[in-house]
Image (cartoon, rainbow, N blue to C red):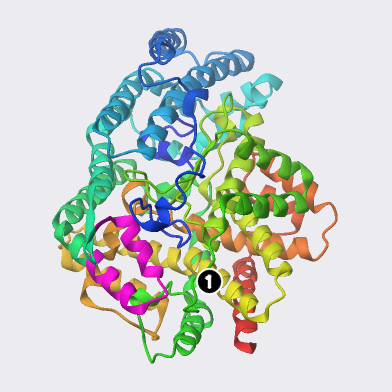
Amino acid sequence: MTGVGPMSDLYFSRFLTRGAHAPSSAHAGADGAAASAWDETLPRWDLRDLYESPESPRLQTDLEQADEDSRAFAQAWRGKLAQADGAAVASAIAEYQRIDEVLGRAASYAQLLFAANSADARIARFSQSVNERLTAISTHLLFFTLEMNRIPDDVLARQLSDPALAHWEPFIRDLRVFRPYQLSDEVESVLHEKSVTGAAAWNRLFDETMASLRVSLDGEDLTLGTALDRMSSSDQNVRARAAKAVGETLTERLRLFSLVTNTLAKDKAITDTLRHYPRPTSARNCANMVEDAVVDALVQAVTTSYPRLSHRYYALKAKWLGVEKLQYWDRNAPLTTQAEPLVPWKDATAQVLGAYEGFDPRMGEIGRRFFDNPWIDAPPVPGKASGAFAHPTVPSAHPYLLLNYRGRTRDVMTLAHELGHGVHQVLAGQQGYLMSGTPLTLAETASVFGEMLTFRALLDAQTDPTRRRLMLAAKVEDMLNTVVRQIAFYRFETLVHDERRAGELLPERIGEIWRQTQAESLGPAFEFAPEYDVYWTYVPHFIHSPFYVYAYAFGDCLVNALYDVFQSGHPGFQDKYLDMLRAGGTKRHRELLAPFGLDAADPGFWNRGLDVIAGFIDELERT
């Protein structure tokens, strides 16, 4: 799929995903009892709003017409942008957007089909075929963003004086971020066309391997997701057996996962070197429209806060569980041996929509559309992608949500999270295909805010002190998983990519880096068995989108600060918040946060967000 950036390796950033990082949505599963109990009542999405089927004549017509239109577009505009006036360039961008949205619709359909059942060979073949076709078509369009970036600054300034082109200024601004790293048209074309047999092929191998894995546990052959889910059991022995069985299964494929990781890291290093990016994270930061220094400040603030956040909380958890040391499989252990009551889907719907409507009826109305229409795929079934995500598709259609709902409170929080993405994507859609997508650093704003609204509503309604403490502890764990764990993931990726530039890493070395970064973040309350060293292998973000993970910490800390402003009674907060979501990708983080009196470049900004987590832990220490 083509997108707002001139480089094909950055196009993935248009898709908003949430995967293996969060305990509420970390693992797809299918064949356990929890899944079968919910299959009959959980909604399945209907993708016919995109296309009727993989054999749809409309899909074939769209692709054929897009191919013809892209060739005509290239013939009309190649080599002529710098000589055109502002109105003409604006017309060209509008036509580029129209063609690109057709390609985006087809890409979305293929991706969603594959996510719902990546174990089906026919669907995998269809998805790959569509990707190859789209890559070939979009090659004709690739010149456009490259040529836009070659327009001299003074010429572009004159063109932008035309109101028609001024409308597209955010799109042009974001393109120019990549200008220093742009290669020749010939090299860009080769990188783009070879992507389907390069990184994309390794991504597919990883996805299909993960979907096919089966874990032998207590006489059953389970999907990886279901086995991982049992590491949240209230029975320590069940958790331990599941953890070791998962470790054995991942170890069996360790050489393959190591090869995939080493190959993708080397592939990225080659491209980064060609583009002269200063460090492995720079491409991601550019795509996120955030300065390296801002990300460094976030990472520094979180790692410095490990002792007052995760180390302190897990010491409390060890005390509550009555153990001297926690094992790695105790990280998400429930704090009570009583089975958590399952939340029926209709109750989860009511809780989330009630929180959204309580904040602002306009947000609730948009959220309700997802439940009134078949836009959500909720049951955990075999072959389905792990975790959860909200896919924006295209503005001419609507977003879709994928969940693996098992009826737990954490699953309710995941629903609140993904619905926030969906609401954001609906509101931003009015900006059009090229300017509706937000950088990852801002893409998590509405989702995390939706989680916070739902959690606060449930907590305020809870009158049982014991249940309230359990809810508060669960929220702290979710926040630690979103902030501390994601920064630990980011540190892991940074070290792996840095070392890979000097040569291939042995699986054992990758495991050492994993243990080092996770032990630093979790603290002295934990012990780690040898098989834990292979647990890096199942995190899909490392494969699909390097350095994506810090966006979760960015978003959580940002929302914590934003929610603090909301609770303080900031005038007109709801209107300003919805305006922020409507802006899509047209504004940067400083512009979006300014109405709330916040600035992510302020060194104290991140600590303000982290203080919210620390405050929850303070409250737990007092109970």
Callout 1 amino acid: Ala
Could you say where residue 388 lies in the image, as x and y percent from the top left?
46, 49
Using the rendered view, name the quadrant where residue 556 is placed: bottom right
Q: Quadrant of the C terminus?
A: bottom right
Residue 64 lies, with reference to residue 403, above or below; the image says: above
**Element type where label 1 sits in the image:** helix
Residue 485 lies, with reference to residue 313, above or below; the image says: above
The tally of labels here is: 1
Residue drawn where x is 25% and y is 47% of the image: 264
Q: Would residue 187 be visible to someone looking at this image? A: no
Residue 185 lies, with reference to residue 202, above or below; the image says: above
Could you say where residue 220 lies in the image, as x and y percent from the top left?
24, 60
Relative horizontal placement of residue 579, taking residue 229 as reference (left or right): right
Residue drawn where x is 64% and y is 72% of the image: 612
- Residue in the foreground of this view, choosing between 462 and 105: 462
Could you say where residue 200 lies in the image, as x and y percent from the top left?
28, 37
Q: Would residue 409 be visible to someone looking at this image? A: yes
- Residue in the foreground of this view, choosing between 455 and 236: 236
Residue 434 lies, with reference to residue 284, above or below; the image says: above
- Residue 240, magenta (yes or no): yes
> Bounds of the magenta span?
221-246
Q: Is the magenta stretch mostly helix, strand or loop?
A: helix
- Residue in the foreground of this view, choosing between 210 and 339: 339
What residue did someone put label 1 on?
301
Residue drawn where x is 51% and y is 44% of the image: 42
**Tag 1: Cα neighbours inside 10 Å, few (<14), some, or many (≥20)?**
some
Relative horizontal placement of residue 161, taking residue 220 as reference (left or right): right
Could you say where residue 619 lies in the image, as x and y percent from the top left?
65, 82
Relative horizontal placement of residue 219, taking residue 4 as reference (left or right): left
